[in-house]
Amino acid sequence: MTNHWNEDHPAFQIAAARRILANEGCESRVAGHVSLRDGEDAFWVSTFGYFGETLPEQVIKVNFQMEQLEGTWTPSPAIAFHASLLRDRPEAQSVVHLHSRWVEVLSTTGNDLGMYSTDAVLFYDDQAHYYDDGVQTPVDGNRMSQLLGTKRLLIMDNHGALVVEDTLEAATVKAIALESSARAHVMAQLIGGKEMPEAEAARSKADYHTYFIPMMWEACYRRLRKSDPDLFECFE
């Protein structure tokens, strides 16, 4: 099969990110989305489908008015909140929304992610909450954006979470770290575990952004070539 995809194309990058998320325990059935900005008023975003089956052809391009510009697959109505977040955060390039197992469990508590694991420091002092009160629009992009403000993690109570970041790579790795940190949070509380000192979380945060995020992306991408050869067949 031949087409216009290559490894630098936004649709391929999103497909790769979703495959990585699936491989790292963040599968979200058909409900999660990954987006990547394209200019000032448009973005590429995944459509319905398991993370682990994503191909570039399943990724579409829409503008902030939800008009479909490229691609033929049917978008989820919920992707409108990606437009709100990207519109209000000009520096942001990517949004990952996930319903992974331990993130869903944590979201039922209404609490912040605790500093129970080392990679949790990525979210230190950088969390907000959104809830559906049963009266307003269930996924209100404007309200989500207001509640998130300048923070990077929005825990959607009784739903899941989303990560807003400056790069697709950072959003993907932080989503992976969120799932593993949520698991550590839940399990640690069962055995009476203690959080790390706040000073340690604050000190380690910068190092994890500097080293952990790029090294994790590179390692996951190398592993992807072996685990998901069908993804790379789209342009071979």
Image (cartoon, rainbow, N blue to C red):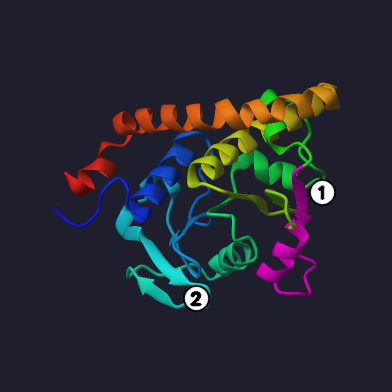
Residue 234 in view (yes/no): yes
Q: Quadrant of residue 16?
A: top left
Q: Amino acid at mark 1?
A: Gly
Specify whether residue 127 is painted magenta.
yes
* Residue 63, numbered circle: none
User: Which marked residue is nearer to the observer: mark 2 or mark 1?
Assistant: 2
Q: Is residue 65 above or below residue 132?
A: below
Q: Quadrant of residue 134?
A: bottom right
The answer to whether residue 127 is left or right of residue 50 is: right
- Residue 106: x and y in percent read 73, 42
Bounds of the magenta span? Answer: 126-148
The answer to whether residue 25 is left or right of residue 154 is: left
**Most distant residue in the left direction:** 1
* Residue 66, numbered circle: 2
Q: Residue at x 59, y 44 (%)?
A: 100
Mark 1 secondary-structure assignment: loop
- Residue 201: x and y in percent read 77, 27
Mark 2 secondary-structure assignment: loop
Q: Quadrant of residue 112?
A: top right
Other residues around mark 2 within 10 Å, as few (<14) / some (14–19) / many (≥20): some
Q: Residue at x 73, y 57 (%)?
A: 148
Q: Amino acid at mark 2?
A: Met
Q: Residue at x 44, y 70 (%)?
A: 62
Specify whether residue 229 is painted magenta.
no
Point out the image quarter for the C terminus.
top left
Residue 195 in view (yes/no): no
Other residues around mark 1 within 10 Å, as few (<14) / some (14–19) / many (≥20): some
The answer to whether residue 136 is left or right of residue 234 is: right
Instruction: Say which residue label 1 marks.
Output: 110
